[in-house]
Amino acid sequence: MTSAERPFRVGLLGHGTVGSAFAALLDERADEIAAVTGLRPQLAGVLTRSRGDFGEILAGSDLVVELMGGLDPAREHVLAAMAAGKHVVTANKQLLSQHGEELWDAAREHGVQLRFEAAVAGVVPVIRVVQESLAAAHIDRVHGIVNGTTNLILTEMARTGATFAEALADAQRLGYAEADPSEDVDGRDAAAKMAILARLAFSTPVRLDQVPYEGIEHITPDDLEYAREFGLGLKLLGTAERVNGGLSVRVHPAFLYAGHPLASVAGPYNAVTVESEAITEITMSGPGAGGPQTASAVLGDVISAMIPPASTPETTAALPLVDDVQSAFYLHMEVADEPGVLAQVAQILGLQGASIKSVVQKGLGDDARLVMVIHPILESKFLAARELIGRLDFLRSAPRAIRVIEEEFL
Ligand SMILES: NC(=O)c1ccc[n+]([C@@H]2O[C@H](COP(=O)([O-])OP(=O)(O)OC[C@H]3O[C@@H](n4cnc5c(N)ncnc54)[C@H](OP(=O)(O)O)[C@@H]3O)[C@@H](O)[C@H]2O)c1
């Protein structure tokens, strides 16, 4: 340490995949950070289930990094650190998507920073861009591929024709999917990230339990074959957008036209598109997860907290949350190959006000596959029609639906 440098003590809660990578990176980059900031970062202590004492670590830290995950004791520790006047950096999307308002209020009350770039979209600096660079842009819509595991699975299903189960097993073998992948594949992980992103982009409190989500477990090779035939991409898409004076936040699989900026995002990558009249559209993409990558985003936050203060999100222009939005749909049915089938399906759709954009029928022996694309319609109306179609005798299995994003960015 040179005589002009002062130490900056970092308390580390959690030393797993990200925590251990962060500790190594902090050590590796200490000289460069000291040269830029005049402060030399050093670990003040590490807390795991088997070592460290939270009280001692807190007393000896200028800033606390929370990389334990889960709600408790992460929430209590983060609140205690802020109450003690320490800045906090966390990568914990569960915590922020369920207790964000309480934590941001505490940060405001105690005049400390709460930074969380690594909680959403991995290394992609979307939080910083939305919170700082686009603070003056009136954002209309945010679209995100915010779960790398599901994007890898869909990419592999499209590339190789594998089933969901086969592609998931491959992702697990390669270390891209956890032994228990349920929060990734059922869309809940992406919903937590979209709740945080929507909160920042629209100054509106959004909790995880207010975000409807659907996963990719039901996607079949047929759906991807259809996508290939029609030049579409199939993605697990998070959306937060202004609708009818309110805000809709949701996660579901969706077909995208090839010109959409997210259509070509492949493998375990994340990408977020922000749309606003002022900026038209910007897209950021990069690795979605991984210890060293996430640690790098965490260290970026630590360095920012060492320099000048950032604002905490306000709720001045909060919007009502909207549940029901218009979507175009792809509808996939396995039916008996007999007269009148198409007419009955079309009649049910028509009664709900759904109009058919295209139909493709393929014979499968005594049965047939019927695939339709429905023009944009209120989701509640489409789902009511699907429910009725599902009760028809000639259906061989439950009809399946995937949203279609119709805009092309050329
Ligand atoms: N992994 C990624 O690629 C990634 C990407 C983005 C964000 N994140 C987020 O980063 C955070 C950490 O994830 P991770 O993958 O590094 O988790 P991890 O490998 O499971 O590590 C968790 C660490 O926290 C410690 N810990 C857990 N509960 C504790 C408790 N009650 N008391 C004390 N220590 C406790 C564990 O201690 P022991 O060592 O004693 O078990 C372990 O050291 C999570 O919020 C996660 O969502 C992870």
Image (spheres, helix red, strand yellow):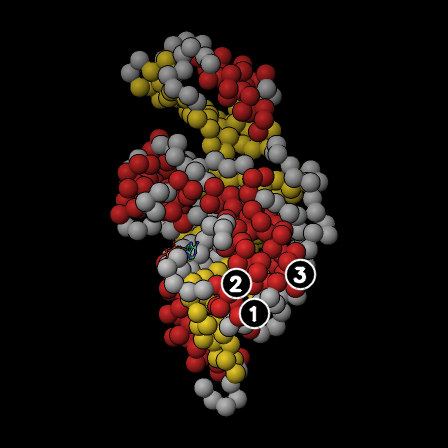
Type of the residue with mark 1: Ala
Q: Position of residue 27 (x, y in %)?
A: 40, 74
- Disc 2 Cβ-to-ligand 1 distance below 8 Å: no
Residue that label 3 marks: 108
Residue that label 2 marks: 89
Type of the residue with mark 3: Arg
Which of these two is toward me, 361 or 34? 34
Name the side, left or right, on which 175 lies relative to 385.
Answer: left
Mark closest to the chain's N terminus, 1 or 3 = 3
Mark closest to the chain's N terminus, 1 or 2 = 2
Residue at position x 69%, y 40% from top? 320
Residue at position x 31%, y 19% from top? 364
Total number of numbered discs in the rendering:
3
Residue that label 1 marks: 305
Tag 1 and tag 3, C-beta contact below 8 Å: no
Residue at position x 43%, y 42% from top? 183
Which of these two is toward me, 97 or 320? 97
